Amino acid sequence: MKNITQDIIRYLTILLTATGFAGNAIAQDDAQNTETYQNTNENTQNTQNTQNHQTQQTTLGKQFNSLSEMIRQNMPEAAAAADNAIQQKAKAKATTVTPEARQYVDAIQKYYDNAKTYSAAFEQEYETVDGIKKTSTGTVWFKKPGMMRWDYETPEARFIISDGESLWTWEPTYRQFCKQSLKGSQLPSALSFLTGTGKIEDDFSVKLAKIDGNQVQLELTPAEPSLAYESMKFEILMPSAKVYRATIYDAMGNLNRITFKSPEINAELDSNSFRFNPPADARHICE
């Protein structure tokens, strides 16, 4: 059985790269240098060889005009290779749940295992290591199996929609969209978690960070970290075990904090709401 806890965790990690929310990204600048040399001796003709060198420069803090532009440029080949290397190295790592955290992990799991649908208003705060901050608000919906929809209302309208097979990003302001296959996507490894099943502890090591009354904070470390996320924090309300805030830390030290407001589970949600049909005048700018 698919569980919404896993979907929430995995969809949240997308937002570091797939919403265009992060002001920092990795880019490549290619340069070519040509070196020519000649060797002459009494028995041979002059020989000329040209050697091409490519230099990759990593640039942080690059600004993007739109979500779709970031999706096209955010994961160049070198960064994707590095991301894959991190995952491969971590695959053998076992996950653990500390005794202090066990009751809370089990409570979260039980609450969301019972949820066939989930919806909430959200506030998303992104902060870079150099202090740049940006806030967005909107509404999110999840439905088993593997469907989700993020409707951003401020600072401008944008949408992230998945029917469980494809991930659509739609920017009505720019009249442009992207469509990604969840299985074949070249986006960061966060997308590989989208349709996962199982328990929190199968994918994360969890320890208790803080207790303040009925508010509990857990620290989660993924068994397979990536450039998109290295660690997470869950803040939950007991005894319901609802996750009211999730904070994601990426490999560069940026944080992405999402606060859920007025959550509701098991409301009727039309599956058609998780499908996207591009308007006739929309530009399809990336796969």
Image: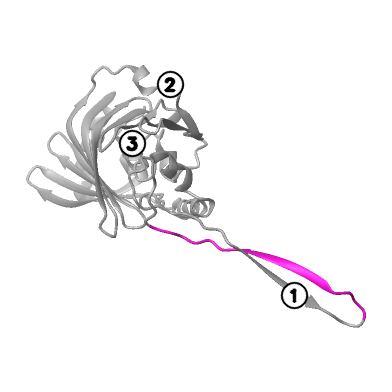
* Above-or-below relation of 43 to 17: below
Residue 269 falls in which quadrant of the image? Answer: top left
Q: Position of residue 264 (x, y in %)?
A: 19, 26
Compute the Cα span from label 3 to label 2: 27 Å
Foreground: disc 3 or disc 2: 2
Q: Is residue 115 visible?
A: no
Identified by mark 2, the residue type is: Asn
x and y percentages locating residue 85 in the rendered image: 50, 54
Q: Nearer the viewer, residue 17 or 282?
A: 282
Q: Is residue 15 left or right of residue 177?
A: left
Name of the residue lying farthest toward the right? 43
Label placed on residue 37? 1
Residue in the foreground of this view, choosing between 52 and 14? 52
* Location of the N terminus (image quadrant): top left
Residue 90 lies in magenta, yes or no?
A: no
Q: Earlier in the sequence, mark 3 or mark 2?
A: 3
In the rendered structure, are the residues bearing label 1 and label 2 in contact, judged by CB atoms less than 8 Å apart? Answer: no
Name the kind of residue labelled 1 in the image: Tyr
Crowd tier of the residue under label 2, counting other residues whose Cα lies within 10 Å: few below 14, some 14–19, many 20 or above = few
The magenta region covers 43-60
Residue under label 2, please give it. 277
Mark 1 and mark 2 lie on one chain; the one further toward the N terminus is 1
Whole-angstrom CA distance, mark 1 to mark 2, is: 58 Å
Give percent across and percent down for residue 114: 25, 26
* Mark 1: secondary structure: strand
Mark 2 element type: loop
Q: Residue at x 32, y 16 (%)?
A: 270
Q: Which residue is mark 3?
A: 6
| x then y, percent, for residue 182 | 47, 34
